[in-house]
Image (cartoon, coloured by chain):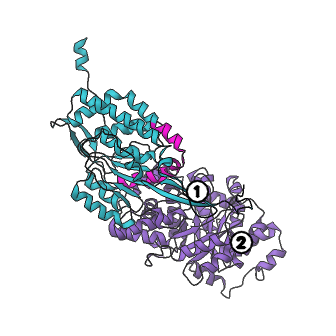
Amino acid sequence: MRVQVDCGCSRSSPRPFQGSSPTALQKNRSLGVYSCYARRYARLVTMPTTAPHALADVTASDSTLRRFLHGLPGVDAVGLEARAASLGTRSIKTTAKAYAIDLAISMVDLTTLEGADTPGKVRALGAKAVHPDPTDRTTPATAAVCVYPDMVAVAKEAVAGSSVKVASVATAFPAGRAALDVKLADVRDAVAAGADEIDMVIDRGAFLAGNYLKVYDEITAVRETCGTSARLKVIFETGELSTYDNIRRASWLGMLAGADFIKTSTGKVAVNATPANTLLMLEAVRDFRAQTGVQVGVKPAGGIRTSKDAIKFLVLVNETAGADWLDNHWFRFGASSLLNDLLMQRQKLATGRYSGPDYVTVD
Amino acid sequence: MSDRTNERLSVFKTYKLYVGGKFPRSESGRVYEVTDSKGNWLANAPQSSRKDARDAVVAARKAFGGWSGATAYNRGQVLYRVAEMLEGRRDQFVREVADAEGLGKSKAAAVVDATIDRWVWYAGWTDKIAQVVGGGNPVAGPFFNLSSPEPTGVVAVLAPQESSFLGLVSVVAPVIATGNTAVVIASEKAPLPALSLAEVLATSDVPGGVVNVLSGRTAEIAAPLAAHQDVNAIDLAGADEALAKELEIAAADNLKRVLRPQPVDDWTATPGTDRMTAFLETKTVWHPTGALGVSGSSY
């Protein structure tokens, strides 16, 4: 979907901002000029090639954006949680379980985001991402490894020649408290080092203050800096957004600004991905595609540790967004310890014996 | 007044499993009827499934680091505390043992007393076993060579079928005294003393997960435990000959330590250290003393 959109941009139609390469941007650091440019540009990239979608003009100004986001229907919190809980009671067994476990493994963004990350640890993680279970080569590779920008080059080398992507967090992760040009430099570094995906954090302070256009402009600026090579995941840090209504607004805001993925959280706060907030975001991407024709991925991250949890999320995906999202191009798990549990469950299915932590890597 | 007392509705006890310091029902939701030796109904006990067994192993593994890392002295204190708590519940256990094993009150009381003494006996062993089975080894070189016993890890224990309380404690206490954690399958016919013992353990400073008590069909629960890759040893005290053979084969896959069933005529006899050493491994370290000086010593 995104590829088509990018093609649309490069057609011969006159581009109002030709010559605004990243280098030109660097020279012109004035936020006002820059954000204005980014906003216009973003409308082009988020637009499907077929026709300008119904939401093309909601981002025209601060007031139209606010009117649109506050006009979204309120979330029935009790209903949402009950729905998420009831979908969690499905019994997934035998062949369906085997399918779900392999699918979940292929959706894992194997993550290490510690201050203590070393090149050795990132290499080990890369090796594990390519062959999660060296004792059983039928195990699918994971989707990506997710690291800090300075580790991208190392990670890229570690997964070279495989289907595993390298995702990099950027934009002053995890707090996102930095000036826009610092954030963009962060993104530029990661992309230059070869990152296939960029995980950015939104400015929660601006969002909670109601400054939606600032958040929108930042996302579009980052989207533009990612260029055509990297997919953009936008992290909302749902644990800091306080209400379900805010999560719904943030989801739409992110999608309008051109996110390829919307992601729940950084994994650095107390409340991370829950079935309820993931369900809410899945509803948002479903509705967004219905209205605009643009498909956006979802990535719950943090706090998903067991196969059982992962399978519950897959049920949510299938029942809410639909089978189109049951693919690692459109759905990911941001996790590290989850993979070991998936592998142990996989070994159990293969051998009939319960496996133990001695039979997977320590990481 | 006395008439009104007789009208009082009796309160039946819901026996539950003991896993990870909590008292869950069986994940399967099943229970089975427990009767006394004459066939009168006593209570419904949870009938564990293999998933309960797996949860218990996870809990035991989680507790292993803390329990094996605790000082031997501290473990002794905790086990002695168990004996103290048992003493306070003596009447309850006398009644339950009498029902379970068809004993008269005085005989049951003797069994319970012997059981409490057994806890105290093993509590005393916690900080002494290392001296008995470990020590310094003489070697030809400038090294200290020290052997020390280390706990094996998570031990699955099939409690004896006949002796529901004394037999149970005689197999569980040596396992945890040395720093292992245990997943115990209570006697199939008489699980109630074991399930009540769990309540004592829960209130006596034993960290949750060190002992996990499951009730149900021994063969059903033991099979996944014997094959479980994260169980390090298995005590087959409560298995009959056919089951023991089957479990021993399953246990070979990850080289579990297996303690075969041994006929025990009299559980009150002094047990010796065999049940403790069965689940200990010997770690030997070579520690350099440094080059010898001209005086023949580096000190």
Give the position of the N terminus of chain B as an image quadrant: top left
Mark nearer the viewer, 2 or 1? 2
Q: Chain of mark 1?
A: A
Residue type marked 1:
Ile
Which is the main secondary structure of the residues drawn in magenta?
helix
From the image, state the color of chain A.
purple
Is B1 in front, or is A192? B1
Count of number-bearing discs? 2
Q: CA distance from mark 2 to mark 1?
A: 30 Å
Region of the chain picked out in magenta, as a range: B51-79
From the image, state the color of chain B.
cyan
- Relative height, residue A221 to residue A357 (above, below): below
Q: Which residue is mark 1?
A: A247
Q: Residue furthest bottom?
A: A12
Q: Can you tell which quarter of the image residue B7 is in?
A: top left
Is B274 in front, or is A217? B274
Is A239 in front, or is A47? A239
Q: Chain of mark 2?
A: A
Q: Which residue is mark 2?
A: A150
Element under label 1? helix
Whether marks 2 and 1 lie on the same chain: yes
Give the position of the C terminus of chain B as an image quadrant: bottom right
